[in-house]
Image: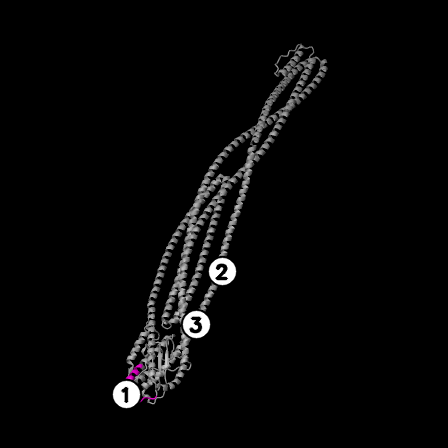
Amino acid sequence: MSLTKVVKVEEVEKRPDSYSLGERFSSQEKFNNAVQDIEATFIGSSGDGLNEEDLSETADKVYPLPEDWPKIPQIFRRKSCELTKATSPCVKKAVSHLELIQNIIEEWFRERDEEQKSRPCSVRPVASKKQLRFSAASGHHNVIKTAGSAKGRQSAASGRTTISLSSANQLSITGIGAIQEEDSALLPYLGAEDVLDEVVTLLARLENDRIDILKALENEKQKVVRLNDKIDHLCLVRMRELPIAVQREHEACIMDLNELTWHVSYSSRTEKRIHQRTHTAEVNNQRLKEEITFVQRHIPLVKEKLQLEIQAMESIKNAQSKTYVELDNTQKRKNKTEAKSNDAVEKATTERNHIKRELDVVKDSLDKINDDYAQSRLTFDTYTKQINDIKAKLIANDMEIKVLHVKNENAKVAEEMKAKQVREIQTQITEAEFEHDRLDNENLQLQSELDTRKHKMNKRISELERGANVRDARLRNITLKNKEAEMEVQDYMDKISDCQRQKVADEKNISRIHKEKARLQQQMAVTEDEFSKISVINSAVREQLLGEQDKAFKMEESLKHRRATAETLRRQVKDEMHTKSVLVARINSDSTDLVKYKKDTTQKRDKAQKVANEVQTAVTTVLTKVEKLRSTKREKTETKEKIRQQMVETEKQKEESRNKFMEQINNLEPHHTHLKDDVTKLEKRLDYMEWKTEQMNKQIHDMDREEVTFKKLVSNAEKAIVDLEERRKELDLQMESLKKIEDDLKKSYEEVLGRIRDNEASHRKMIEQRKKFLGESEVQKSHKLEINKELASKYRQLQNEHMIVKDKMMNNFDDRVKIEAQIKDTTQLQALQRRMHVAMLAYLKYRGLYNRSELDRMETETDQNSEQVQHLQVKMDDAIKQITEFLQTQVQGGAAAKRVAWGSVGKTSRGVGLSQPPSRQPTVVEA
């Protein structure tokens, strides 16, 4: 009797604690080789087989299920599927066990058939002890039978039942319990109970794995829910923060608009002020024009007034010449009167001396004549009285003469004063005319010099303004270039920061990928389906998160870019306003300098020199700034080159990372193809096993038709079949649940694949749309930049035109201010001329009146003098007559006395009539 031994897979397979990828991929080939080795070696028919069986049974123990089934406690001996959570290794192990048992049973049946064919047997046993058959559709067709003879095989074949486990793994158990009369020692030990125990444990493990998989699936669903909640939270955060950022940007734009409106209103107010000033200047100009026309109209009247004044001056001069003539006549008359008075005095003195002499003679004669003394005394008294009266009259005349001398002197002094005044006035008039001519000449010269200097200064100012405008344009260009360079550097820095962030993210992703790769390498053979689902879900969620993060980041970058553009525009507006204010301040300072230059030429020169020095210093400062800007530009170009080099290096690193990933993909693709090949092989093997099962079913049907003796055994086996059917139903329910789980997993896998495809298609579409949008945005950006440049150039042109118009208006305003100053000067001169004219009229009036009064006074005085002279002449005639009469009375009858008397009378008459000194004649006294 030949004995067979049930060999387990644990004896053949290697038992590593952890599988490597190569071992897991080549486990099926090793399994097939081990099965072939076992089929070739572990079949024997000697007594040594019992010892080996006892040893193997003592070495290989299969423990029964514990009480707390389906949880399996830790078994002392480590199983091959202990370190994994997937169901496929345990199923493969059960299939391999069943295949081994099937092969062993088939070999035994062959040997038994050969033995039965070799020896004839007339006695048949009543019934077999036990018949079992296991059929698994996952691999080869496995059948386990126990029988005592060929009849037992036929009865077992007729009473078989099949239990289908699953579409991929099917298990059928067929058996009939009966009592055999023959000795049981003739049947070999097949180990069916151990197989059943192990199958039950494997099914329990499968149930535990299913429960664990359900728990893991629930955990994954919870993870999906959490990730969805997280995505929703991020969306809500974004929805909250985006309006805030937009509101901030809107507020910043409103602030900018308010500032611009303020500047516009300020410029409009300044424009209104300028319009008002121009209106006032126009009104003043019209008034000045009217005054100029009024002056031009009234110039002939003024000329007539001047002619009248000249005529009055000529009449005054004629009157003065007449007064001078009259003064000469009066002086001549006065000289004549003085000469006459002097002659009279001399005559009186001579007559007195002669009288004294005569009196001496007379006294000598009176001594002789005492009788006539009384009469002569009386006459003498009378004559003395008369002489005293004459003396008094002479004294009065002397006093009057003195008074007349004083008056004459006063008149001379007044005449001299008036002459001096007239001369001074004439000199003043001549000097005024000369000064007027000189001032006119100087005014013309200064006007010409002022015009030339204005022309020169205007040229110089225009040149300086041109130079300033050119330098301002250069500065603006340089500042714009520097700003553009700064913006480019900022953009490059942002790009570098983004690249660094992307680099860090890529490094993190690479490290994560490496970790995931290691973990996948650890868990790839354990759970390919679950891992594919979870990885696809995680990758989809990660891609969604990354997409949302990229969108948020791009929105932040766009907002930053818009904010940066707004800040740059604000800075440009501030710079332009600053330059405008600086230019306005310079213009104001230049205008003040020009006004001061109009006041003082020397101060203007000094200020011009100061301005030139300031311009030179400004030019030097601008040159230094330009050099600094050039140096900064060079540094920026160097930094740009460095940034470009870094960009090239980052692109190289990116290409290297792409190459690495492609290499990894290329390395993983053959593994994927190998797995696909394994799957196709398994499917082919399953098809082969189904075909083989069909053939065996056909053989079984044939055997049922041939065998009739198994009917009795069927009735006994049906009871066992009922029990087994109950177990089968339970197993069917379990397998149906497993089928449902597998179907759900397949559906979820297909859905995940569909999602992956849809996501890839949507990702491609999104990438294409983003590329299109990027191209359109770049085109719009270039177009907007060109529009911005055009607007900037137009703004600069308008600003320059505004500055030019402002300069022209300021020049016009300065000219009008000058004209106003000139008009004020002319009005002041006109007022002064009017006042001077009035003063001259008053002066001439008073002078004419004074001259008339003086002439009248002098005429009256001359009349009085002439009357007094006539009165004196009358008195002197009377005195002479009295003297002659006295002499005649004193010298009676004396010829000498008569001659003396008549000689004195003739002398007096001659002196009075001819105003000549009397000739001395000898007095002849006739006795």
**Which image quarter is the N terminus in?**
bottom left
Q: Would you call the spot at circle 2 few (<14 residues within 10 Å), some (14-19), or many (20 or more)?
A: few
x, y percent for residue 870: 66, 19
Q: Would you call the spot at circle 3 few (<14 residues within 10 Å), some (14-19), or many (20 or more)?
A: few
- The answer to whether marks 3 and 2 mark residues whose Cβ atoms lie closer than 8 Å is no
Asked if residue 379 shows in the view, the reply is: yes
Q: Which residue does the numbered mark 1 point to in the structure image? A: 120
Distance between the alpha carbons at the discs numbered 2 and 1: 100 Å
- Is label 1 in a helix, a strand or a loop? loop
x, y percent for residue 98: 34, 79
x, y percent for residue 45: 28, 84
Position above or below: 335 against 697: above
Q: Residue at x 41, y 63 (%)?
A: 762
Q: Nearer the viewer, mark 1 or mark 3?
A: 1
Numbered circle sitting on residue 219: 3
- Of the residues shown, which amino acid type is indicated by label 3? Asn
- Of the residues shown, which amino acid type is indicated by label 2? Pro
Magenta: main secondary structure? helix
Judging depth in this view, the residue of 547 and 443 nearest the camera is 547
Q: Earlier in the sequence, mark 3 or mark 2?
A: 3
Q: Would you call the spot at circle 1 few (<14 residues within 10 Å), some (14-19), or many (20 or more)?
A: few
- Is label 3 in a helix, a strand or a loop? helix
* Image quadrant in which you'd find residue 316: top right
Distance between the alpha carbons at the discs numbered 1 and 3: 67 Å
- Of the residues shown, which amino acid type is indicated by label 1? Pro
Q: Earlier in the sequence, mark 1 or mark 3?
A: 1
**Which image quarter is the C terminus in?**
top right
Q: Which residue does the numbered mark 2 point to in the structure image? A: 243
Position above or below: 447 against 74: above
What's the magenta region?
106-126
